[in-house]
Amino acid sequence: MLPSGAVSLTQIEYFVAVAEAGQLTRAAARLHVSQPPLTRQIKSLEEELGTPLFRRTRLGMVLLPAGDTFLTHARRVLLELAEAKRAIRTSAPRGRSGCGDDSSE
C-alpha cells in the first residue's frame, strides 16, 4: 500500500496513455482496461497532485500547463524504470536471484 499522497506507477502509466491518446476511450483500449477505472485513476492522480492535469472537452482530453509539465517527468520515470529493468536483466547472473544466498559464509 502506498503512503497517503503517493503517486503510483499505474497512475503514471495511465496518465501518459491518456496524454498521448488525447481521449479516455483510446487510452483505455491501448491499456486494455475499461474506461471507468482509468477515469478514477486520473482523477485520483489530480487530487494527489492538487491540480487538474487535463481540460475535459467533448472531443477529448487536452493537457493543461500542469499536465504538460507532469508529462515530461512521467515519461522520464517510465524511461528510468525501463532502463533499470534492462540493466538488471543484463547484469544479474541467470537463474540466481541473490536473495537468501548464504554460500559466501
Image (tube, helix red, strand yellow):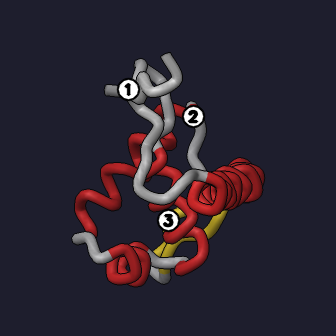
Name the residue at 40% across, 41% down: 44
* Quarter-of-image position of residue 89: bottom right
Determine which of the numbered discs, if any, sits on residue 100 in the image.
Answer: 1
Type of amino acid at the residue the image marks with label 2: Leu
Q: Pointer 3: residues within 10 angstroms few (<14), some, or many (20+)?
A: some
Q: Secondary structure at mark 3?
A: strand
The dot on residue 23 is none
Local secondary structure at mark 2: helix
Horizontally, is 44 left or right of 93 in the view?
A: left
Q: Residues within 10 Å of mark 1 (few under 14, many from 20)?
A: few
Drawn side of residue 88 relative to residue 99, left or right: right
Res 64 visible: no
Type of amino acid at the residue the image marks with label 3: Arg
Identified by mark 1, the residue type is: Gly
Q: Which residue is mark 3?
A: 56
45 lies above or below 59: above
Q: Position of residue 46 (x, y in %)?
A: 50, 42
> Which one is nearer the viewer's eye here, 20 or 31?
31
> Mark 2 or 1 closer to N-term?
2
**Residue extending farthest top:** 105
- In the rendering, which numbered label is found on residue 49? 2
Q: Please name whichever residue, 17 or 87, is drawn nearer the observer in this view of the structure.
A: 87
